[in-house]
Amino acid sequence: MTTLVMKFGGSSVGTKTALTQVLSIVLHEREQWDNLILVVSALDGVTDALIEAAHLAHLGNQRGYRRIVANLRTRHMALIEELPLGATERSALQADIDRLLFDMLGMYETMSNTPAETPVPDLIDATIGVGEKLAARIIAALLRQKDVRSVALDATDLIVTDDTFGNATPDIPLTCERIRTHLLPSLERRIVPVVTGFIGATRTGKPTTLGRGGSDYTASIFAICANANETWIWTGVDGMMTADPREVDSAQVIPRLSYEEVAELAYFGARVLHARMIGPLRDQHIPLRIKNVFKPQQPGTLIHDAPPEPPQQLKAVTSISGIALTAARNGPLSPIRQLVDRTLVATTHTHADVMISSQSATHSLVCFLVPTSAGPDAVHAARTMLEQELRDTPDTAAWTVKPVGIVTVIRDKIDEAPLLIAGIIQCLAGQRILALTLGPSRCSLSIVVEPEQVDQTLLAIHDLIIHQ
């Protein structure tokens, strides 16, 4: 029996045109595979709106969060009206969506009655995961209308996590046990489950989220628990690119990558994939494909553990925001690392990934990145809180904080290519390099620069990649 897990991102489920593409893809692949498992994200922009609504609710702004919920209801109902659904199916779907939104309003009411200084991370996670529930029900209804047996499943009933709200870690053995017990039997009956990405629940049933972009992670979890043959991620781009096409116009599709290379790409800022999704697939040797939902005939990018390509080729360059701390002294770095970690956990729900720590006779530097999964405001929030903590902590008063950009070049076994590294450095002539490091994975070379130099650095290195 062959099994394919397909994940559809927000841009591929947000309009009638996109959903028509999704339906066409599912109908085609259903004839090619014995079993299909679909994982879906919320409609594009919905999670951001829900995060804002949760923030307003926590501040007691009833008018603000009710306005957002009303707008979301209007958007989803308008989309449903455009879809080719029968009257009974449409009515049931509308009632289901109203119930989910009504329950969410109840949670917002609880949050608004809670003092703003009292953390409510469990309620925040419970509300921001509703977008996936809405999308899953729409897709399942659309499939049923085409005579495909389909059911929307909430991953809160299947994925068991710890209680790190905002960036939970799944308990893989227990999750696999639940998936094999409650989901796999439906595949034998030719049912196509549509599973909510991004969310899970603690052992006691409290909803959690897996971090921004966590629907990718959901797909890889279902792939390993269902012993899938392949996992496909459907996006709005043609595959993994040599650079972010929103930043570099000449970016090109990369036909093949190793698991290690794509993991580094995701870790260092590529927004197509969630960084934590690669490990489970690599461990089980499950191939991963990145494909464009609007160009399904294109091969996209294949990620697998086949022998690497000739080692003379640089694969990609990416960028991510970071924060550097410097001090005009040397000495133990443990206190500053602990302070950074506490701050990042408080502001982004992720632990600090210290990329570089360096000391000379008179100076010290610590540089860490801020993951894209932490959201667009994370760098500012972390920097502001760090500056306050440094002022309030005598042992760290000598340290100063500054934002930096981290530009990373990806290539397998880059540590064995000194001439390529020399070429990268040479193409940056005239720029100030704050720090330079080879990643322990042997797949990445990261260059720390001033924020205003990120674009110039990206373009220079990308030009080297496409003309090598």
Image (cartoon, helix red, strand yellow):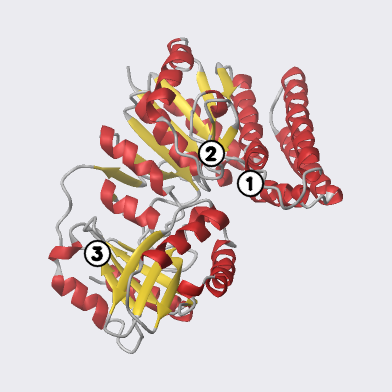
Residue drawn at the location 30% of the way across and 51% of the way down: 255
Disc 1 from disc 3: Cα separation: 35 Å
Q: Is residue 423 left or right of residue 196?
A: left
Do the numbered discs 3 and 2 sit on residues whose CB atoms are within 8 Å? no
Q: Which mark is drawn over residue 333?
A: none
Q: Amino acid at mark 2?
A: Phe
Q: Which mark is drawn over residue 198?
A: 2
Do the numbered discs 2 and 1 sit on residues whose CB atoms are within 8 Å? yes
Residue drawn at the location 55% of the way across and 68% of the way down: 389
Disc 3 from disc 2: Cα separation: 32 Å
Q: Position of residue 97 (x, y in %)?
A: 73, 30
Q: Position of residue 164 (x, y in %)?
A: 52, 41
Q: Would you call the spot at circle 2 few (<14 residues within 10 Å), some (14-19), or many (20 or more)?
A: many
Q: Nearer the viewer, residue 417 or 4?
A: 417
- Please determine whether, in this image, residue 173 is positioned above or below residue 340: above
Find disc 3 in the rendering and name its residue: 314
Residue drawn at the location 79% of the way across and 47% of the way down: 65
Q: Is residue 2 visible?
A: yes
Label 1 or label 3, whichever lies nearer to me, is 1
Q: Amino acid at mark 3?
A: Leu
Q: Earlier in the sequence, mark 1 or mark 3?
A: 1
Do the numbered discs 1 and 3 sit on residues whose CB atoms are within 8 Å? no
Q: Would you call the spot at circle 3 few (<14 residues within 10 Å), some (14-19), or many (20 or more)?
A: many
Q: Position of residue 247 (x, y in %)?
A: 47, 68
Q: Amino acid at mark 1?
A: Thr
Q: Is residue 99 left or right of residue 272?
A: right
Q: Residue 245, located in which quarter of the rendered image? A: bottom left
Q: Residue 421, located in which quarter of the rendered image? A: bottom left
Q: Is residue 181 left or right of residue 50?
A: left
Q: Earlier in the sequence, mark 2 or mark 1?
A: 1
Q: Is residue 435 left or right of residue 295?
A: left
Q: Position of residue 145 (x, y in %)?
A: 63, 21
